[in-house]
Image: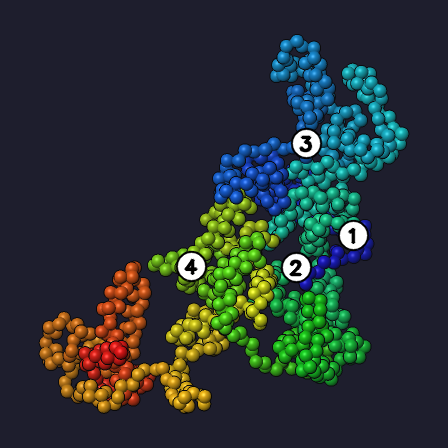
Amino acid sequence: MTFSSPLLPVLNPARESRDRLELLTALINGPDFEPLLRDDVIHIPPNHPDYGWGCRVADCQRVSEIGKGLCSAHGQEWAALAEQGGQLEKFLQTALPREALVLTSPGNCLVEQCARPAQRRQRRLCFRHSNNWASAKRSSTADTDFDEWISRQKPLPSYGNCLVASCDDLAFNPLGLCEDHYGLYHRMGRPGAAELPAKWFWNFDRYGLKTPVQFDDETAFRTWCRTTPPPTRLGVLNLRGMHPLMQAELRWSLFSHARRSDRSNWHLQVVQGVIAECRSARSLDQLDTARITRRDHQQMIEGIRRELRIIYVTPADTREAGYLQLDHFGRRPTRLAPELDLTMLPQRWLRDLLWDYFADTLRSPSSTRAATFFHTLRRACQELAAFLDMAAENRGLDPRLLEEDDVHRFIADMRRRSRDRLTSLATASQKKPTTMTEVTQKRILDDLRKLFRWVLDQDQCDSRGLKRSFIRAFPSGVKTTPRTRSPFSDDIAEALADPVNLAKLDTHDPADRGMRDMWTLIVATGRRASEVRELRLDCVRRVNRVPLLWHDQTKVGNYDEAIRIPEYAHQRVLERQQQTTALFVRRFGRAPMPQERPRLALFSSNARNPRGERAVSANWFNQTFRDWVAELDLGRQVVPHQARHTLATKLLAAGAGLHHIKRFLGHVSERMTEHYAKVALSEIDDVLQHVWVSGPGAGLPGELLSEGVTLLPPEQAQALVIDLNRRSTPTDGGICTFQVVVDGGVCPWKLDCENCDKFVMTGADLLYWRRKRDQWHSLAERAPTDEMADWLHQQFEPTRRAIEGLEQALAGLGLLEDALALDLRRPQDYFHRLWSTGFRTTDLAAIGTRQDTP
């Protein structure tokens, strides 16, 4: 909530203005203040880092359009070139500069040492030398050489400065006005009817005499000269003729605003317009903002008042006025307005208590960084204040009258509203009542208990007039079931990934801030929306030829965590980097420096972002996503965070353990991971296959509908069993029964166990060979060509059949579940039946072959 009241009321205007002027003068004269802003007529360079107004094209003298960085002429040229695929950097290097058309100072006459101003539409000559040049051209029969003629001219004395108090140009004629104000004076009807005598040049000026000026009302003329604003000039901020306090306020606000890292862009044209609005006022307190119609002028004036409140108003003054100025504490929680309004609390004691608690929190070393802390606690106090105002004695204005029973009635009222789904007494930031829920009730009670427990800890009960029984009556909120999101259903996931629907998402991002790229990364990586929004420009790189995404997983600005991302997501990030860099070039006319790139936001905001370091806001992202989902008409509430749950569920179903998912998603405990992996069917699929039966309407009701491993008949499985009680030796993935090797001899087949008929596999080796099968499949998928993949599958085909035969044999003997659950960490497992029951691989492969053939 933005607090947009004017400055604090002035009790003694004369004394207050003097004190404020002395304070601002001391700050302006300080060593850190920019010297450029100390002059009455401030000449801003075209390439000024904060208030630059020039066109990005080198040596172009025209003013840039607001928010574009190019003048209108070069803007049109670039728009035509951009449609043809041109590059902005190359255009800035090759474009021809343009001369200024208007809003420039006329300058002095070209005649050396001539003290009179040049005419705007002549050869840079003053009025008299211009007439002399015209006479010389008429009297000469041949073309007159201008340079030779001008070298023979004598300089003329000045008419003095323009009589308009705010103007710094030279007078145009003996009337005492510059060329611009001379024309303006006639257009405004010549107040006071000042005029020069007839033939003033021939009678006075040509002889060097002072020309007298005639008036009908000299006072009216002098008043017009005192109140008329200066002419608008390119890159000039004219503070002449303004009240000293207003000058100081404008100087300080321009300097203070330029130092902010999250400032909005004050274009010089807007600054000139605001100075014109403020010219007649003594200070911003006396400025009548009701007559200001331009929105950008209103916003800038409010920004100036914000800068002045920081130095005009002390923390004690803000406490008295009922708001919290966060800049007084040197902290600004993320996405929180500079002023926190507390005036909605009618009880002064409660408002002061909340102000003191907030101030103590902001002064502590471990101050919170979240704006939610301030909003929720203020909302809790607002709920209590509304109830006390309605039901307590004396409307709760006197804390000494509050009893324990008031707290009990307040809690009962909240519970009733939560039970019946009624609206709350307080209003949220949207200025409308909200429905009371169990979660809201718990949050309110927890926050109020925290606030009043702080009063007890600080031993302030007596000084604040609060009874200890009243404070102790606030309980903790009842623990509620935490709300967790469910994964996307198949139909919603398909709709959110459909290319046609993703094209619709682009229409909701007309400025191309990267909404589609953000959504792609959220789906592919399972990152939180805030982690993706806050990505920096150099957030991807390859390590060992693997694309990695570096992000802030700690939420405190440490971009030191990396996760692997798919290749298509990596390519989208690279394209977004190029677009963000092009946006930086449009803003600053150059590519970002290497030391700037780590600070630049990948998804850059277009508001309050002078250096390109501010990312798009959460409100913009969420609103854009809601608009897109509403257009798709999915029929239910869909939020971006469900993509994180969906990825966790898929990882678990694919065989990843909770510890793997915990590390990938960045959780602090596996308990948190369990909230995300809510639907994991892979662990019970085999069990369900053995308990599902056909329904009553089927041909054979109750028939087992198992699709698991085909069981081998027990007698056939027993025939294949090899007695391993005889001498044998273990080998990789099984047991060798070849006596030469068992006795210590050399294997004649060079340990090619997988193709040896002496090689025996047991149930204890089943998990090993399953992992071996997954490894071969992975190698085949990553093969560079299809022929190589087919060759790998052919080489592993005998082993695959042996694995399937082992599963069928174990199932026939009733040992399959034991083999899948075998834990080799216990010594007694080595005496298990699985170790003494073995099968030749050739026999197992034959079983697998028979099962594969019709």
At horizontal 70% and vertical 64% (from top left) the residue drawn is 341
Q: What amino acid type is highlighted by mark number 1?
A: Ala
Residue at image location 49% in from the left, 44% down from the top: 85
State the mark number for residue 568.
4
The residue tagged with tag 3: helix, strand or loop? loop
User: Element type at marker 2?
Assistant: loop
Most foreground residue, 355 or 737: 737
Tag in front: 4 or 1: 4
Pointer 1 and pointer 3: residues touching (CB < 8 Å)? no
Tell me whether the residue at label 4 lies in contact with that at label 3, contact meaning CB atoms closer than 8 angstroms. no
The amino acid marked with disc number 3 is: Ser
- What distance separates the C-alpha of mark 4 from that of mark 3? 56 Å
- Most extreme residue toward the right is 216
Q: Are marks 4 and 1 in contact (CB under 8 Å)?
A: no
From this viewpoint, is residue 45 visible?
A: no
Tell which tag, 2 or 4, sits nearer the viewer.
4
Q: In the rendered image of this protein, does residue 706 appear above or below residue 444? A: below
Q: Going from the N terminus, do you reach mark 2 or mark 3 first?
A: 3
Most distant residue in the front direction: 699
**Residue kind at label 2, given as amino acid type:** Pro
How packed is label 4: few (under 14 Cα within 10 Å), some, or many (20 or more)?
Answer: few
1 or 3: mark nearer the eye: 1
Q: CA distance from mark 2 to mark 3?
A: 40 Å
Indicate whether 66 appears above or below 851: above
Nearer mark to the viewer, of 4 and 3:
4
Q: Residue 434: percent from the left, percent from the top? A: 68, 72
Compared across the picture, whether 830 is left or right of 361 comes to left
- Give the residue at mark 2: 338
Q: How is the protein colored in the picture?
A: rainbow
In the picture of the structure, the residue carrying the numbered disc 1 is: 290
